[in-house]
Image: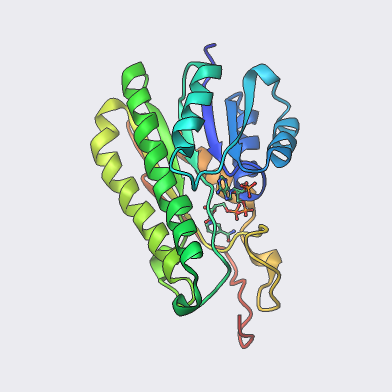
Protein backbone atom coordinates (compact mmCIF):
# COMPACT_ATOMS: atom_id res chain seq x y z
CA UNK A 1 0.00 0.00 0.00
CA UNK A 2 1.62 3.29 -1.06
CA UNK A 3 -0.85 5.86 0.33
CA UNK A 4 0.13 7.79 3.43
CA UNK A 5 -1.31 6.51 6.71
CA UNK A 6 -2.30 8.61 9.75
CA UNK A 7 -3.13 7.58 13.32
CA UNK A 8 -5.64 10.01 14.87
CA UNK A 9 -6.35 9.63 18.59
CA UNK A 10 -9.68 10.85 19.94
CA UNK A 11 -11.11 10.54 16.42
CA UNK A 12 -14.66 9.69 17.53
CA UNK A 13 -15.94 13.24 17.88
CA UNK A 14 -14.98 16.90 18.20
CA UNK A 15 -11.57 18.06 16.99
CA UNK A 16 -10.25 14.56 16.29
CA UNK A 17 -13.17 13.75 13.99
CA UNK A 18 -12.68 17.05 12.09
CA UNK A 19 -8.98 16.29 11.63
CA UNK A 20 -9.70 12.72 10.48
CA UNK A 21 -12.23 13.87 7.88
CA UNK A 22 -9.81 16.48 6.51
CA UNK A 23 -7.04 13.86 6.27
CA UNK A 24 -9.41 11.52 4.42
CA UNK A 25 -10.26 14.34 1.99
CA UNK A 26 -6.56 14.39 1.19
CA UNK A 27 -6.58 10.66 0.44
CA UNK A 28 -4.67 9.77 3.59
CA UNK A 29 -5.60 6.37 5.04
CA UNK A 30 -6.75 6.43 8.66
CA UNK A 31 -6.23 4.52 11.88
CA UNK A 32 -8.96 5.91 14.15
CA UNK A 33 -8.49 5.49 17.91
CA UNK A 34 -10.60 6.18 21.01
CA UNK A 35 -12.52 4.07 23.54
CA UNK A 36 -15.96 4.20 21.88
CA UNK A 37 -16.02 2.03 18.74
CA UNK A 38 -19.48 3.28 17.63
CA UNK A 39 -18.26 6.89 17.39
CA UNK A 40 -15.14 5.79 15.51
CA UNK A 41 -17.32 3.81 13.08
CA UNK A 42 -19.36 6.99 12.48
CA UNK A 43 -16.16 8.89 11.70
CA UNK A 44 -15.07 6.10 9.38
CA UNK A 45 -18.43 6.15 7.62
CA UNK A 46 -18.31 9.97 7.22
CA UNK A 47 -14.78 9.69 5.79
CA UNK A 48 -15.98 7.52 2.91
CA UNK A 49 -12.81 5.42 3.19
CA UNK A 50 -12.98 1.71 2.41
CA UNK A 51 -12.27 -0.81 5.21
CA UNK A 52 -8.93 -1.49 3.53
CA UNK A 53 -7.97 2.17 3.89
CA UNK A 54 -9.41 2.74 7.38
CA UNK A 55 -9.03 0.95 10.69
CA UNK A 56 -10.99 1.43 13.89
CA UNK A 57 -9.06 0.68 17.09
CA UNK A 58 -11.01 0.83 20.35
CA UNK A 59 -8.32 1.55 22.92
CA UNK A 60 -8.09 3.26 26.30
CA UNK A 61 -4.98 5.40 26.02
CA UNK A 62 -4.78 5.93 29.80
CA UNK A 63 -3.65 2.28 30.00
CA UNK A 64 0.16 1.99 29.84
CA UNK A 65 -0.10 -0.68 27.09
CA UNK A 66 -2.58 1.38 25.02
CA UNK A 67 -0.09 3.23 22.77
CA UNK A 68 1.87 0.03 21.95
CA UNK A 69 -1.35 -1.86 21.13
CA UNK A 70 -2.46 0.98 18.87
CA UNK A 71 0.80 1.06 16.91
CA UNK A 72 0.79 -2.73 16.52
CA UNK A 73 -2.76 -2.66 15.16
CA UNK A 74 -1.85 0.11 12.68
CA UNK A 75 1.36 -1.60 11.52
CA UNK A 76 -0.39 -4.96 11.11
CA UNK A 77 -3.06 -3.38 8.91
CA UNK A 78 -1.07 -0.79 6.93
CA UNK A 79 2.63 -1.79 7.34
CA UNK A 80 3.47 1.92 7.63
CA UNK A 81 2.69 5.06 9.65
CA UNK A 82 3.36 8.50 8.17
CA UNK A 83 1.38 10.84 10.41
CA UNK A 84 0.31 10.78 14.07
CA UNK A 85 -2.18 13.24 15.53
CA UNK A 86 -2.02 13.13 19.32
CA UNK A 87 -5.45 14.66 19.90
CA UNK A 88 -7.21 12.61 22.63
CA UNK A 89 -7.45 14.63 25.81
CA UNK A 90 -9.66 15.23 28.79
CA UNK A 91 -10.36 17.63 31.68
CA UNK A 92 -13.02 17.33 34.40
CA UNK A 93 -14.44 20.78 33.70
CA UNK A 94 -13.13 23.80 35.59
CA UNK A 95 -12.33 22.72 39.12
CA UNK A 96 -10.09 23.95 41.96
CA UNK A 97 -6.92 21.90 42.43
CA UNK A 98 -7.93 21.04 45.99
CA UNK A 99 -11.23 19.61 44.71
CA UNK A 100 -9.63 17.35 42.06
CA UNK A 101 -9.55 13.67 42.92
CA UNK A 102 -6.54 11.36 42.62
CA UNK A 103 -8.33 9.56 39.77
CA UNK A 104 -8.84 12.83 37.88
CA UNK A 105 -5.18 13.76 38.35
CA UNK A 106 -4.03 10.34 37.10
CA UNK A 107 -6.41 10.39 34.14
CA UNK A 108 -5.28 13.82 32.91
CA UNK A 109 -1.58 13.00 33.24
CA UNK A 110 -2.02 9.59 31.60
CA UNK A 111 -4.15 10.75 28.66
CA UNK A 112 -2.94 14.31 28.01
CA UNK A 113 0.77 13.79 28.60
CA UNK A 114 1.92 10.19 29.02
CA UNK A 115 -0.01 8.75 26.05
CA UNK A 116 1.25 11.26 23.44
CA UNK A 117 4.81 10.87 24.73
CA UNK A 118 4.58 7.06 24.58
CA UNK A 119 2.94 7.08 21.13
CA UNK A 120 5.58 9.46 19.77
CA UNK A 121 8.39 7.32 21.22
CA UNK A 122 7.05 4.12 19.66
CA UNK A 123 6.08 5.61 16.28
CA UNK A 124 9.34 7.57 15.94
CA UNK A 125 11.23 4.27 16.17
CA UNK A 126 9.11 2.89 13.29
CA UNK A 127 9.53 6.09 11.25
CA UNK A 128 13.31 6.00 11.70
CA UNK A 129 13.36 2.29 10.75
CA UNK A 130 11.24 2.87 7.63
CA UNK A 131 13.39 5.88 6.65
CA UNK A 132 10.60 7.89 5.03
CA UNK A 133 10.28 10.69 7.62
CA UNK A 134 6.81 11.61 8.88
CA UNK A 135 4.81 14.10 10.90
CA UNK A 136 3.63 14.06 14.51
CA UNK A 137 1.17 16.78 15.54
CA UNK A 138 0.15 17.27 19.16
CA UNK A 139 -2.97 19.14 20.28
CA UNK A 140 -2.25 21.26 23.36
CA UNK A 141 -4.33 24.19 24.68
CA UNK A 142 -3.92 27.90 25.44
CA UNK A 143 -4.56 26.84 29.05
CA UNK A 144 -0.84 26.01 29.00
CA UNK A 145 -0.01 29.64 28.27
CA UNK A 146 -2.63 31.41 30.37
CA UNK A 147 -2.16 29.12 33.39
CA UNK A 148 -5.76 29.75 34.47
CA UNK A 149 -7.29 29.11 37.89
CA UNK A 150 -9.43 25.94 38.06
CA UNK A 151 -7.40 24.29 35.28
CA UNK A 152 -4.06 23.78 37.06
CA UNK A 153 -3.54 20.09 36.26
CA UNK A 154 -4.90 20.36 32.71
CA UNK A 155 -2.69 23.43 32.07
CA UNK A 156 0.35 21.58 33.42
CA UNK A 157 -0.23 18.56 31.16
CA UNK A 158 -0.64 20.77 28.09
CA UNK A 159 2.44 22.86 28.99
CA UNK A 160 4.33 19.58 29.28
CA UNK A 161 3.07 18.54 25.85
CA UNK A 162 4.35 21.80 24.32
CA UNK A 163 7.78 21.31 25.94
CA UNK A 164 7.83 17.68 24.79
CA UNK A 165 7.03 18.70 21.20
CA UNK A 166 9.88 21.19 21.04
CA UNK A 167 12.41 18.82 22.62
CA UNK A 168 11.46 15.84 20.44
CA UNK A 169 11.64 18.06 17.34
CA UNK A 170 15.26 18.76 18.26
CA UNK A 171 15.91 15.00 18.39
CA UNK A 172 13.91 13.86 15.35
CA UNK A 173 14.25 16.69 12.82
CA UNK A 174 17.33 15.17 11.18
CA UNK A 175 15.29 12.04 10.27
CA UNK A 176 12.84 14.19 8.30
CA UNK A 177 10.25 13.75 11.06
CA UNK A 178 8.15 16.89 11.47
CA UNK A 179 6.97 17.70 15.00
CA UNK A 180 4.37 20.36 15.71
CA UNK A 181 1.98 21.45 18.42
CA UNK A 182 -1.32 23.20 17.78
CA UNK A 183 -2.43 25.36 20.72
CA UNK A 184 -6.14 26.21 20.48
CA UNK A 185 -8.27 28.44 22.67
CA UNK A 186 -11.91 27.53 23.33
CA UNK A 187 -13.32 25.10 20.73
CA UNK A 188 -17.03 24.26 20.43
CA UNK A 189 -17.04 20.54 21.35
CA UNK A 190 -18.63 18.31 23.99
CA UNK A 191 -15.49 18.72 26.13
CA UNK A 192 -16.77 22.18 27.05
CA UNK A 193 -20.10 21.75 28.86
CA UNK A 194 -22.97 24.22 28.33
CA UNK A 195 -22.24 27.41 30.25
CA UNK A 196 -24.17 30.69 30.05
CA UNK A 197 -20.91 32.61 30.31
CA UNK A 198 -19.88 31.29 26.88
CA UNK A 199 -21.06 32.53 23.50
CA UNK A 200 -20.55 29.27 21.62
CA UNK A 201 -20.96 30.91 18.23
CA UNK A 202 -17.70 32.76 18.96
CA UNK A 203 -15.72 29.67 19.96
CA UNK A 204 -13.36 28.05 17.45
CA UNK A 205 -14.86 25.42 15.17
CA UNK A 206 -13.18 21.98 15.24
CA UNK A 207 -12.61 22.46 11.50
CA UNK A 208 -10.40 25.49 12.24
CA UNK A 209 -8.12 23.33 14.37
CA UNK A 210 -8.09 20.75 11.56
CA UNK A 211 -7.03 23.50 9.13
CA UNK A 212 -4.06 24.33 11.38
CA UNK A 213 -3.04 20.66 11.38
CA UNK A 214 -3.25 20.61 7.56
CA UNK A 215 -1.02 23.70 7.47
CA UNK A 216 1.62 21.68 9.32
CA UNK A 217 1.35 18.82 6.81
CA UNK A 218 1.33 21.17 3.79
CA UNK A 219 4.35 23.29 4.78
CA UNK A 220 7.45 22.91 2.60
CA UNK A 221 9.62 19.96 3.66
CA UNK A 222 12.38 22.42 4.58
CA UNK A 223 10.18 24.43 7.02
CA UNK A 224 8.49 23.01 10.12
CA UNK A 225 5.67 25.09 11.71
CA UNK A 226 6.65 23.93 15.19
CA UNK A 227 3.92 25.74 17.11
CA UNK A 228 0.60 27.24 16.00
CA UNK A 229 -1.64 29.13 18.44
CA UNK A 230 -5.28 29.64 17.47
CA UNK A 231 -7.54 32.08 19.33
CA UNK A 232 -11.18 32.80 18.51
CA UNK A 233 -11.29 36.10 16.63
CA UNK A 234 -14.01 37.45 18.98
CA UNK A 235 -13.96 36.89 22.77
CA UNK A 236 -16.38 34.02 23.57
CA UNK A 237 -16.44 34.60 27.35
CA UNK A 238 -19.25 37.03 28.21
CA UNK A 239 -18.01 39.81 30.46
CA UNK A 240 -19.66 40.07 33.86
CA UNK A 241 -20.97 36.46 33.84
CA UNK A 242 -18.97 34.12 36.09
CA UNK A 243 -17.91 30.76 34.64
N1 LIG B 1 -12.64 21.86 23.23
C1 LIG B 1 -11.75 22.80 23.56
O1 LIG B 1 -12.10 23.97 23.92
C2 LIG B 1 -10.27 22.53 23.47
C3 LIG B 1 -9.39 23.62 23.50
C4 LIG B 1 -8.03 23.40 23.43
C5 LIG B 1 -7.54 22.12 23.31
N2 LIG B 1 -8.42 21.06 23.29
C6 LIG B 1 -7.84 19.70 23.17
O2 LIG B 1 -8.29 19.14 21.95
C7 LIG B 1 -8.31 17.72 22.08
C8 LIG B 1 -9.66 17.19 21.61
O3 LIG B 1 -10.68 17.76 22.43
P1 LIG B 1 -12.21 17.84 22.03
O4 LIG B 1 -12.67 19.16 22.48
O5 LIG B 1 -12.40 17.43 20.62
O6 LIG B 1 -12.80 16.74 23.05
P2 LIG B 1 -14.00 15.66 22.90
O7 LIG B 1 -15.04 16.19 21.98
O8 LIG B 1 -14.35 15.30 24.29
O9 LIG B 1 -13.28 14.41 22.18
C9 LIG B 1 -12.25 13.74 22.86
C10 LIG B 1 -11.87 12.48 22.10
O10 LIG B 1 -10.84 11.82 22.86
C11 LIG B 1 -11.25 10.47 23.13
N3 LIG B 1 -10.78 9.98 24.42
C12 LIG B 1 -11.14 10.45 25.65
N4 LIG B 1 -10.57 9.67 26.60
C13 LIG B 1 -9.86 8.70 25.95
C14 LIG B 1 -9.07 7.60 26.40
N5 LIG B 1 -8.92 7.32 27.72
N6 LIG B 1 -8.49 6.81 25.47
C15 LIG B 1 -8.65 7.07 24.15
N7 LIG B 1 -9.37 8.10 23.68
C16 LIG B 1 -9.97 8.91 24.57
C17 LIG B 1 -12.77 10.54 23.10
O11 LIG B 1 -13.37 9.29 22.82
P3 LIG B 1 -13.85 8.24 23.97
O12 LIG B 1 -14.49 9.05 25.07
O13 LIG B 1 -14.75 7.35 23.22
O14 LIG B 1 -12.60 7.54 24.41
C18 LIG B 1 -13.01 11.52 21.95
O15 LIG B 1 -12.94 10.83 20.71
C19 LIG B 1 -8.01 17.43 23.55
O16 LIG B 1 -6.65 17.10 23.69
C20 LIG B 1 -8.29 18.74 24.25
O17 LIG B 1 -7.56 18.88 25.44
C21 LIG B 1 -9.78 21.23 23.34
Q: Position of residue 113 (x, y in %)?
A: 41, 52
Query: Between residues 176 and 85, which one lies in front from this camera angle?
Result: 85
What residue is shown at x 53% (from left), y 25% (from top)? 73
Q: In which quarter of the image is residue 170?
A: top left
Left or right side of 98 for 241: right
* Total marks in image: 0
> Which coloring applies here?
rainbow
Q: Indicate the quadrant containing the N terminus: top left, top right, bottom left or bottom right.
A: top right
Q: Where is residue 47 in the image (x, y as percent from the top left)?
A: 70, 31
Q: Can residue 219 be seen in this view?
A: no
Q: Is residue 54 above or below residue 194?
A: above
Q: Position of residue 55 (x, y in %)?
A: 62, 26
Q: Where is residue 239 in the image (x, y as percent from the top left)?
A: 61, 84
Q: In which quarter of the image is residue 53?
A: top right
Q: Indicate the quadrant containing the C terminus: top left, top right, bottom left or bottom right.
A: bottom right
Left or right side of 222 for 147: right
Q: Is residue 132 visible?
A: yes
What residue is shown at x 64% (from left), y 24% (from top)? 54
Query: Between residues 30 and 115, which one lies in front from this camera angle?
Result: 115
Q: Which residue lies furthest to the bottom in this view?
A: 240
Q: Is residue 198 above or below residue 178?
A: below
Query: Between residues 83 and 106, which one lies in front from this camera angle?
Result: 106
Q: Residue furthest top?
A: 1
Amino acid sequence: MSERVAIVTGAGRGIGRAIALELARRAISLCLAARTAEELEQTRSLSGLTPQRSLVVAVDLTRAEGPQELVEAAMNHFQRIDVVINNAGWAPGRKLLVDCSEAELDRMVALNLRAPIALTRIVAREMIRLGRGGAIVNIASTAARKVPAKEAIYAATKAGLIAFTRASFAELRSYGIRLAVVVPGLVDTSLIPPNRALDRSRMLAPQSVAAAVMHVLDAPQSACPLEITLEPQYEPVRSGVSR
